[in-house]
Image (cartoon, rainbow, N blue to C red):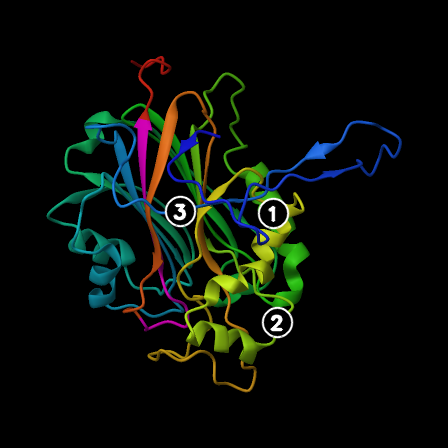
């Protein structure tokens, strides 16, 4: 991993750098063991503390939102925000309606950014925006998509992933926006989908001589739930603003600790309230007969592949509570990168 600003080390599951060892299933007597890092939970810095007087080379604003088939221009404006202190804006949408979301995003960003690339697969959409004239230092733009099973496509609520690869200012990045299978019991199915997507995206025209991405960012409705706690004890903790005590029940962090998914990835602290499932237009969690357990289904994780070249600092990781037109809350992260010019061959 690359250098990260202000890494938090905790004691609960998913809150620290996890390593565990187990025998490979097919070699019972082999002394070699697999080491899994799990997901590293990192804190948020208010400024780019790379070095005194140093500024980042690239700042990325990342947004994911399950729209539940609804949209308004006011929500899009709120989603992208008025503070444009970033170079790239990456927007991943799930269950997007038939409206021309691209047109609404372009209108909201007209004064500051242009669309560099989009990848869509029915209701699953991904957009990358850059500053005006940024196409001058943008290349290697590619997109791909991967669908997973189920009948979601019949109602335009496709499961799977879309991806965009981009070389921006000499930094090679890969963005993956996904929508994985729902329901608490389908954790193994989600794990399998994650692995298939990881192995399949951009594999059709794989070039063994191509340079790999230096940073990979996953965003989307990953649908991992809280497990092992009933809905009302969970809601009581949330009402007391003690939701961080629930992270030990989070399936994503549990499965990462087991080495099943997101090995070596980083994620900001889950300090915000679980983003699903809300009553639409309300601040209340699900009041239907199912009274679902609130969960952090909507996530943003990243992995630095080039440990000698790129440092990363996370400025924010939060939900957007003011957008309530869906049963999900959007999640936004602000990630800044700094290139070690002594180690990078492009300098």
What whole-number distance in Å separates the C-alpha atoms at marks 1 and 2?
A: 19 Å
* Disc 3 secondary structure class: loop
Q: Which of the numbered marks, if any, corresponds to residue 229?
A: 2
Q: Is residue 282 above or below residue 214?
A: below
Verify whether residue 143 appears in magenta.
no
What whole-number distance in Å separates the C-alpha atoms at marks 3 and 2?
A: 26 Å
Residues in magenta? 324-338
Residue 156 appearing in the image: no
Badge 1 density bin: few <14, some 14–19, many ≥20, Cα 10 Å: many
* Disc 1 secondary structure class: helix
Badge 3 density bin: few <14, some 14–19, many ≥20, Cα 10 Å: many
What residue sits 19% from the left and 32% below the top?
134
Verify whether residue 329 appears in magenta.
yes
Q: Going by the image, does 257 lie left or right of 247?
A: right
Q: Quadrant of the C terminus?
A: top left
Q: Nearer the viewer, mark 3 or mark 2?
A: 3
Q: Which of the numbered marks, if any, corresponds to residue 43?
A: 3
1 or 2: tag closer to the N-terminus = 2
Between 9 and 332, the residue placed more toward the observer is 9
Q: Nearer the viewer, mark 1 or mark 2?
A: 2
For disc 1, the marked residue is: 256
3 or 2: tag closer to the N-terminus = 3
1 or 3: tag closer to the N-terminus = 3
What whole-number distance in Å separates the C-alpha atoms at marks 1 and 3?
A: 18 Å
The residue positioned farthest toward the left in the image shown? 111
């Amino acid at each position: 991993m690359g250098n990260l600003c202000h890494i938090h080390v905790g004691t609960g599951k998913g809150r620290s750098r996890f390593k565990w060892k187990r025998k490979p299933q097919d070699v019972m007597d082999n002394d070699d063991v697999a080491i899994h890092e799990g997901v590293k939970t990192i804190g948020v810095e208010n400024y780019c503390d790379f070095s005194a007087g140093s500024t980042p080379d690239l700042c990325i604003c990342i947004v994911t939102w399950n729209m539940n088939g609804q949209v308004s221009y006011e929500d899009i404006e709120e989603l992208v925000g008025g503070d444009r202190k970033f170079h790239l804006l990456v927007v991943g949408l799930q269950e997007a309606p038939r409206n021309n979301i691209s047109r609404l995003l372009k209108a909201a960003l007209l004064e500051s950014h242009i669309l560099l690339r989009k990848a869509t697969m029915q209701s699953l959409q991904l957009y990358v925006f850059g500053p005006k004239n940024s196409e001058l230092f943008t290349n290697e733009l590619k997109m791909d998509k991967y669908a997973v099973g189920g009948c979601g496509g019949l109602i335009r609520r496709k499961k799977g992933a879309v991806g965009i690869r981009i070389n921006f200012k000499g930094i090679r990045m890969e963005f993956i926006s996904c929508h994985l299978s729902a329901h608490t019991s389908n954790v193994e199915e989600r794990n399998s989908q994650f692995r298939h997507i990881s192995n399949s995206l951009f594999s059709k025209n794989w070039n063994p001589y191509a340079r790999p991405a230096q940073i990979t960012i996953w965003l989307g409705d990953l649908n991992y739930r809280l497990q092992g706690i009933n809905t009302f004890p969970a809601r009581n903790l949330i009402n007391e603003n003690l939701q961080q005590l629930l992270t030990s029940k989070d399936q994503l962090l549990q499965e990462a600790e087991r080495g099943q998914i997101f090995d070596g990835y980083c994620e900001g602290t889950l300090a915000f309230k679980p983003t699903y499932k809300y009553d639409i237009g309300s601040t209340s969690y699900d009041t239907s007969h199912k009274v679902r357990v609130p969960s952090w289904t909507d996530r943003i994780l990243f992995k630095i592949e080039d440990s000698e070249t790129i440092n990363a600092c996370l400025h924010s990781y939060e939900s957007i509570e003011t957008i309530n037109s869906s049963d999900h809350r959007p999640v936004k992260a602000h990630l800044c990168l700094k290139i070690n010019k002594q180690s990078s061959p492009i300098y």
